[in-house]
Image: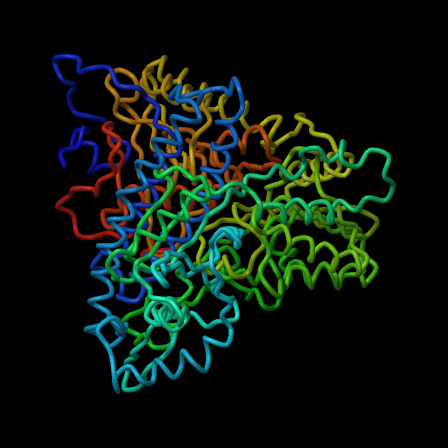
Amino acid sequence: MKNDLSEDIINTPSAQPSAQPSARPPARSIYINRELSWLAFNRRVLEQATAPEVPLFEQLRFVGIFTTNLDEFFMVRAGELTDRALIAGDASDDKTGMTAAEQLRALYASARPLYDYRDRVFAGVEARLSAAGIKRLDLRGMDGAELAPVKKYFKRELLPLLSPYLIDAKHPLPHFENKRMYIAAALKKDGRSFYGIVPVSDALESVYIADSGGGGVVYATVIDILLRFASQIFSKYTVSSRCAIRVTRSADIDVDDNFDDDNVGIEGVDYREYVRAKIKSRAKLAPVRVEHYGGGYAKSDKPAVYITERLKTPGELCFRSECPLDASFIRKLEPYATPAMLYPPRVPQPPRSLQCESRTFDSRTVTAVAEERDILLVYPYEQMGPYLRLLREAADDPGTVSIKITLYRLSAGSEVVALLRRAAENGCEVTAVVELKARFDEDNNIGWSKLLEEAGVHVIYGIDRLKVHSKITLITRRRDGKISGVAHIATGNYNENTARVYCDYGIITTNEEICADAAEFFRALTLGVTQSDYRRLLVAPESLKSGVLAKIGEQAKLADAGRPAYICLKMNGLTDKDIIDALADASRRGVSVDLIIRGVCCLRPAVFGETDNIRVVSIVGRYLEHGRVFIFGAGEPESGGCEVYIGSADLMTRNTTRRGEICTPVLDTSIAARLYKITRDQLRDNVKARWLFSNGEYEPLVTADPPFDSQLMGLN
């Protein structure tokens, strides 16, 4: 596909088009709809399943990632738009002017081709896996002795756990649980037609292993087995058609909505139990998608059409798939993948910031090093161990006065929680801000909050209607009669598991102004208020957005004066209209802007006379690019030619206006230089990078340079 961006700017970071067309092309909006941008992102995820440099089993995993991503998209985004479409006078999208109903129609229409694309991609991956020794049985053409072992497994392991029932005048349509798999069949008996439903129990394994050994495996999914033996499940009926059904329901719940009204006059209400009750109501919300998987059987649409009609769900919400709907079977096959089918293992290294010329880190405390210089942690290339060691040192140090931390998502068996409990049990004052509204982690965080409280940790839940998304730890010590602090501010969660696969950054610092700001931030949280008068930190919702806008404005003024001006923003998503407009204004005034945005980007680059000087690149690869880095200035960090920030916030409306977020300046020039180099490398990437053009399409970088995968370079 021909792109709309001059080839000149593809090859050199920060370069500009060498010439403009002599005639002005038709005007094009500088905005892209958020939902359509997200679907384009998920397509880029699925494209990894066709990338020749991706190992074979990892290709299958990308199909699964695409699938689970799409599940959450429908639950959250389609769910929210569905609710908004029912509200009279619902405001249109502030960028594209589309109403909620118009956005819904557009996203459903755009999602449908993705199903066809996934079917083709999955078929190709499955064929390659089969040739390599991981083979899925085609049960439709099997019978007799060949089918006997599968039939035996069905009768012994599956049939006793099934609870089939009919749908007719005396048997109403059951409640379809969110994302639960069901087998649906069109039945006939004595000239009458019926429909049968079989809920697929969570107690069933997702995969049946027919044969393994010699570096290979032959398997069948349990859904395929149930479809094959539908006639035995409904043994008194003739099965005329069958399919697997899955209903996706909205998960758009405002946990804080009506909390005060619901609990007026009730003393001792536990906010955790209120949250738990609210999230249980997700199971009863409206369907936003109905999927059906035919398993290759003809006439599989009939039961799906019937159920969709009975659910009073519009036809555009119904999607047919020839790829299994539940991706959980993939992880069951991983033990049978050969090393060549998987990414080679990469062991996180000790952080470069802790390397000393004359002394080894092992002989010193993290705090001692931080008192000399700031420490940068770069995940997943570097270990999370130094941060955990910092917590451990604080927990065991009798001079530690307090530990304060924000917790958003945690790993199972979290060592962070264990260390906080240890500190509290040792008599340290520990305050944990646990965000109970972290979507789909609410139950986990409720459990963690109780464990922390049992150990004596003071647990708070942030500010009403403000989701605390920041990643910050503040440790305060008393030493020789003086109070000192050490702060850790990061772009990613305190989660040992995601630290192995998410590209994130964290800084440990003893800078007095930053530690004082951190203390003010926690003081505001404990008092249930927000504030804006910070010395160094940019904090949402009060000062982060205004701070970023001010930095953009400074670069625009430099361009006005004919001086070099540059902005580079690396993040997960960009939707905030004010920031988009400011970037477009900076572009018009001559500022060179690079945006490294993995996911949603609502800014359309290279629009003539509007965003000519803006480039947008997305990198999707082995690791999930999660870090946020903001660079303002056209010079090198070592010479003080630019300012570098890292933090928890994407420049999305939800982050800038409805969340508690923190961005910190990077004051150590050597650390700023490393972060700057990471962005330079990503702008050079010609393997995983996809560039957004003014036609709204993402395309690979076209270059004669040798292949350069920025994620493989790591810290080089």
Is 596 rendered above or below residue 53?
above
Q: Dividing the image into 4 quarters, which one contains the C terminus?
A: bottom left
For the point 12% across and 13% down, which residue is it?
A: 22
In the image, 47 versus 143, the foreground residue is 143
For the point 13% across and 12% down, which residue is it?
A: 23
Q: Dividing the image into 4 quarters, which one contains the N terminus?
A: top left
As drawn, which residue projects farthest toward the front?
190
Residue 84 appears in the picture as rendered: yes
The image quarter in which residue 463 lies: top right
In the image, 94 versus 231, the foreground residue is 231
Q: How many marks?
A: 0
The image quarter in which residue 271 lies: top right
Residue 635 appears in the picture as rendered: no
16 horizontally vs 160: left or right: left
The colouring scheme, among rainbow, by chain, secondary structure or one colour, is rainbow
The image quarter in which residue 263 lies: top right
Is 116 rendered above or below residue 28?
below
In the image, 512 versus 120, the foreground residue is 120
116 horizontally vs 452: left or right: left
Q: Position of residue 609 (x, y in %)?
A: 26, 15
Q: Position of residue 367 (x, y in %)?
A: 65, 55
For the point 35% across and 17% down, which residue is it?
A: 559
Q: Position of residue 89 (x, y in %)?
A: 52, 17
Q: Position of residue 482 (x, y in %)?
A: 80, 47
